[in-house]
Amino acid sequence: MFTCEKALLKTYGTFADVVELMDESFLKRAVSSHTSKLSAFDEAERLIEMIELKKDLIDLYGMITDALADLKRSDYILLDGRYSLTGETQTEEEKNRNYYRRLAIAVGRFAYAVRRRGVDEKKFSEYAKKFHFIEEAYSEEKAKEKDFFKGKKTIAVKIQKASSII
């Protein structure tokens, strides 16, 4: 549940590093364009594509930042502690049942705020195709979800069979 949003939260702290790497790559490509075997027009098109890609990443970063700003302070602190949004290590809160319940509620509120800004599953998949680090985080979250529900499905089937007997 909320797999896309969890992937966004997981990668949020790395956006600045990715933008910096994109800038370095752009600069190297622009400086060494005279040695390229491509025509000047083709090389210019590639540079424009890199700029557009960076713009898309910055737009996504802005949408996530705005969604996080809409959250209650307590929700933001929980998400920051779990996903290291600020990049700083947080003091560990006791991870009991109440912690996980509040964390799930905070993720749900974040998901609502992000979807209000137009990042639904379709838009997320477009971003995931463009940015492999987001796609990797999504795959990891999907695998966690699959492992979590693996045992739950058999329990649900047993409960359903037992209720049909009665």
Image (cartoon, rainbow, N blue to C red):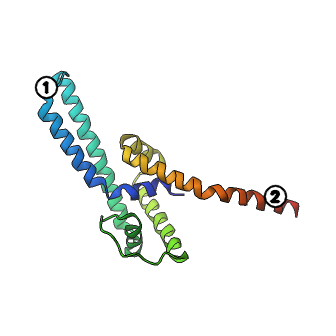
Rendered position, 163 above or below 139: below
Give the structural element (helix, strand or loop) at label 2: helix
Q: Residues within 10 Å of mark 1 (few under 14, many from 20)?
A: few
The quarter of the displayed image where residue 6 is located: bottom left
Label 1 or label 2, whichever lies nearer to me, is 1
The Cα–Cα distance between marks 1 and 2, rounded to whole angstroms, is 70 Å
Give the structural element (helix, strand or loop) at label 1: helix
The quarter of the displayed image where residue 9 is located: bottom left
Q: Position of residue 12 (x, y in %)?
A: 34, 57
Left or right, 134 with reference to 21: right
Q: Residues within 10 Å of mark 2 (few under 14, many from 20)?
A: few
The quarter of the displayed image where residue 52 is located: top left
Where, quadrant-wise, is the N terminus in this rendering?
A: bottom right
The three-letter amino acid code for the residue at tag 2 is Lys
Q: Position of residue 10 (x, y in %)?
A: 40, 58
Left or right, 103 with reference to 157: left
Name the disc covering residue 161, or none.
Answer: 2
> In the orientation shown, which residue stands out farthest toward the right?
166
Q: Quick one: 118 or 158, which is closer to the camera?
A: 158
Mark 1 in CB contact with mark 2 (< 8 angstroms): no
Name the disc covering residue 35, or none.
Answer: 1
